[in-house]
């Protein structure tokens, strides 16, 4: 299995988990209404990261290595925010601690994406999503 196929498979499994957890989250089962903005923000971050990463891969395939650090940062972001969305949807006891890690990942990715935001709209979109998610993380982080 090639790295790209593995990433697609892992991403699909993570997305299915997030979708299942979010679908199970109904108002009568939700104990903390503040979790919903965090779920939405984390999922938005994953989506923006997906677009940014695809763009990075296209540029890397064309030989543009200036975007390599952005691609690495986005890869971490996607993994962290996917898990963040699941934990937030479940109102997990781990959420406050994990939100601290996610905040750091979002801030790091935002910084990296901003380096390219004047040239690449998807990098700008990812940076903005990261900033928003970092703010939501800060509300619940310990």
Image (tube, rainbow, N blue to C red):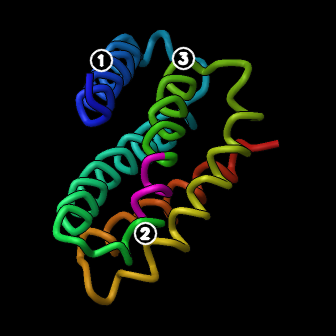
Residue 73: within the magenta?
A: yes
**Tag 3 residue:** 90
Quadrant of the rendering where the N terminus is positioned: top left
Residue at 57% in and 24% down:
87
Please say if 26 is above or below 58: above
**Tag 2 residue:** 127
Circle 1 SS class: helix
Residue at 32% in and 32% down:
7
Magenta residues, dominant SS class: helix
Provide residue 60's location: percent of width, then percent of height.
26, 65
What is the quadrant of residue 91 in the picture?
Answer: top right
Please say if 140 is above or below 108: above
**Tag 1 residue:** 16
**Left or right: 48 in relation to 131:** left
Which numbered disc, 1 or 3, marks the residue closer to the eye? 1
Quadrant of the rendering where the C terminus is positioned: top right
Provide residue 65's location: percent of width, then percent of height.
35, 72
Which residues are drawn in magenta?
70-75
């Amino acid at each position: 299995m090639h790295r790209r196929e593995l990433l697609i498979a892992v991403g699909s499994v993570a997305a299915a988990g997030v979708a299942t957890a979010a679908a199970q989250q109904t108002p009568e089962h939700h104990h903390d209404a503040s979790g919903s903005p965090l779920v939405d923000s984390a999922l938005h971050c994953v989506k923006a990261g997906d677009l940014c990463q695809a763009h990075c891969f296209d540029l890397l395939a064309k030989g543009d290595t200036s975007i390599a650090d952005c691609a690495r940062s986005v890869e971490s972001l996607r993994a962290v925010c996917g898990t963040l969305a699941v934990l937030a949807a479940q109102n997990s006891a781990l959420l406050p601690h994990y939100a601290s890690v996610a905040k750091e990942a979002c801030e790091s990715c935002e910084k990296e994406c901003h380096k390219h935001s004047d040239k690449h709209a998807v990098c700008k979109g990812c940076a903005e999503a990261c900033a928003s998610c970092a703010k939501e993380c800060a509300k619940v982080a310990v």
